[in-house]
Image: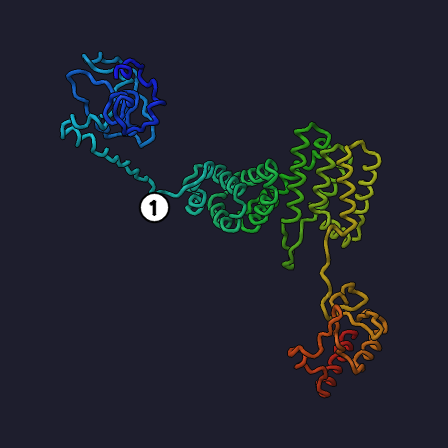
């Protein structure tokens, strides 16, 4: 027995394992139930040292604002309290008492240790959105356009501010032209009552149309509408006359502008394109009530093209191409009605520029594409003649939708064939007009197919005769 106490703890564990954990006696080390100091039950944790004279403190209560489970809370660094006498170090202090020491904990401490942590309810965020909130507008958009025009010009101190605001509005929203132009014209009729006011209106529209390229078309439409709906007609001229005088002022310096610097040429090109839009949109009523275009603009565009081609710089040639794409078809039709060959002269001049001028390759390609466009009648496609006037001679698509027939020899023929009548009549006279059709070696009309067996291969004599008359009558009417 003394030998068992003299061994180090755990020594000879392997030799005593053969007797079993329940065997006592000297072989088991002298301990009851064979449990030596080195062997403890596996389900019990090793006992923790306790401070003498102090009970194990209960677990701390969860704070009211406890973080969610699994989240780590950082404790801010601060002055540390000195440890209590006899207290364990922080790293070795147990959070809860082991099972073997729970018998020494008072009942109230045990209940507090087993209490569940309080559930923290997150505060509900209240939305500040409301159905009665004002309408949202993106940045840069002014919502008082429509209201200001419907209310008139009371909110504008001067005519220029009112007109300029409306022009900017049309530039941003060209689709509002149809709905707001009438109110705009009525407001101008009550405001523009002097020659100076009319001259100021013309200048504002001209500057907007020549300074903003995208406004040239809208500016031409606006000028056409105001020329017919402004009631003021002073001695100096009405709106259209003052507008043409303003354009003439720029037209008279065309040669110097075409040779000027880049800024001057750019302003001149804007004027050229605006004049082209005016020629297409400005309507002049004749004495008989017929609507025509301004012939003076037609002459002016011809001279402007000469000025551009006389100075074959890249930007001048590009402007000429844009002008001809815009007005070429209308100008050529007008010149042909008068028996003029101005378009032929312009095309010849373009070809000379392509051969001789020192312009870029891209510009030459643009000029050649323009010549090709003119050769195709400016891309215009005439509508196909009506059915009554259509004949195989004037309509290439006359037999497009005609069916294709086959002779007994398998030769296809259509209504476009010269001997169509004879072949078609022979086809009708054949007794086996609907022969048995075989596909992939299978007779579709053979026995065993109840659907095809019920089909009568022969028409009644009256129906067949009426069908033949219908076909012949249709062909005769088509050739008439």
Q: Position of residue 408 (x, y in %)?
A: 83, 75
Q: Is residue 8 left or right of residue 249?
A: left
Q: To which quarter of the image does residue 66 belong?
A: top left
Judging from the image, the colouring scheme is rainbow
Residue 244: quarter of image: top right
* Quarter of the C terminus within the rendering: bottom right
- The answer to whether any part of residue 109 appears in the image is yes
Residue at point 18% right, 12% down? 85
Q: Against 400, is 149 above or below?
A: above
Taking the image as shown, residue 76 lies to the left or right of residue 369, namely: left
Q: Nearer the viewer, residue 313 or 251?
A: 313
In this view, the residue in front, 330 or 432, is: 432
Residue 157 image point, x, y percent: 43, 37
Quadrant (top left/top right/bottom left/bottom right) for the N terminus: top left
Left or right of residue 29, residue 246 in this image = right
**Residue ID at (77%, 40%):** 367
Please tell me whether mark 1 sits on a helix, a strand or a loop: loop
Q: Position of residue 402 (x, y in %)?
A: 75, 69
Q: Which residue is mark 1?
A: 131
Asked if residue 321 lies left or right of residue 15, the reply is right
Question: How far across and how far down the image is residue 124, in percent?
Answer: 29, 38
Foreground pick, 421 / 256: 421
- Answer above or below: position of 130 versus 14: below
Residue 389 can be seen in this image: no
Residue appearing at x 66%, y 47% in the figure: 279
How many labels, in total?
Answer: 1
Answer few, some or many: residues within 10 Å of disc 1's Cα (few below 14, many 20 plus, some between 14 and 19): few
Q: Nearer the viewer, residue 129 or 278?
A: 129
């Amino acid at each position: 027995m003394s030998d068992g106490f003299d061994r180090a703890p755990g020594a000879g564990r392997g030799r005593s394992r053969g007797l079993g954990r329940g065997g006592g006696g000297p072989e088991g080390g002298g301990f009851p139930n064979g449990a030596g100091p080195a062997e403890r039950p596996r389900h019990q944790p090793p006992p923790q040292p306790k401070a003498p004279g102090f009970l194990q403190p209960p677990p701390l209560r969860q704070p009211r604002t406890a973080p969610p489970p699994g989240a780590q809370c950082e404790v801010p660094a601060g002055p540390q309290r000195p440890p209590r006498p006899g207290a364990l170090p922080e790293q070795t202090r147990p959070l809860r008492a082991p099972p073997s020491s729970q018998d020494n904990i008072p009942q109230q401490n045990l209940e507090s240790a087993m209490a569940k942590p309080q559930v923290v309810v997150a505060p509900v965020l209240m939305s500040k959105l409301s159905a009665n909130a004002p309408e949202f507008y993106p940045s840069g958009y002014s919502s008082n356009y429509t209201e200001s025009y419907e209310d008139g010009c009371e909110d504008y101190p001067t005519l220029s501010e009112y007109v300029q605001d409306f022009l900017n509005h049309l530039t941003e929203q060209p689709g509002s032209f149809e709905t707001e132009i009438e109110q705009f014209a009525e407001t101008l009729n009550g405001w523009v009552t002097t020659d100076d006011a009319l001259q100021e209106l013309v200048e504002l529209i001209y500057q907007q149309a020549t300074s903003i390229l995208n406004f040239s078309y809208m500016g031409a439409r606006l000028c056409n509408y105001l020329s017919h709906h402004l009631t003021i007609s002073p001695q100096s001229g009405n709106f259209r006359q003052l507008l043409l005088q303003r354009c003439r002022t720029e037209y008279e310096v065309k040669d110097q502008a075409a040779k000027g610097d880049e800024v001057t040429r750019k302003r001149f090109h804007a004027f050229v394109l605006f004049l082209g839009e005016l020629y297409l949109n400005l309507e002049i009523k004749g004495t008989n009530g017929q609507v025509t275009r301004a012939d003076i603009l037609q002459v002016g565009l011809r001279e402007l093209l000469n000025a551009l081609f006389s100075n074959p710089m890249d930007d001048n040639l590009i402007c000429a191409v844009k002008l001809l794409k815009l007005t070429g078809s209308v100008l050529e039709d007008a010149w042909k009605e008068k028996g003029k060959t101005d378009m032929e002269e312009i095309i010849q001049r373009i070809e000379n520029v392509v051969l001789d001028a020192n312009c870029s390759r891209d510009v030459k390609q643009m000029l050649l594409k323009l010549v090709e466009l003119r050769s195709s009648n400016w891309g215009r496609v005439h509508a196909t003649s009506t059915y009554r006037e259509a004949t195989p001679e004037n309509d290439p698509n006359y037999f497009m939708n005609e069916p294709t027939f086959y002779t007994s020899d398998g030769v296809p023929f259509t209504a476009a064939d010269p001997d169509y009548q004879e072949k078609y009549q022979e086809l009708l006279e054949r007794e086996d007009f609907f022969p048995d059709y075989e596909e992939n070696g299978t007779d579709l009309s053979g026995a065993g197919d109840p659907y095809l067996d019920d089909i009568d291969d022969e028409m009644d004599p009256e129906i067949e005769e009426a069908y033949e008359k219908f076909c012949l009558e249709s062909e005769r009417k088509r050739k008439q």
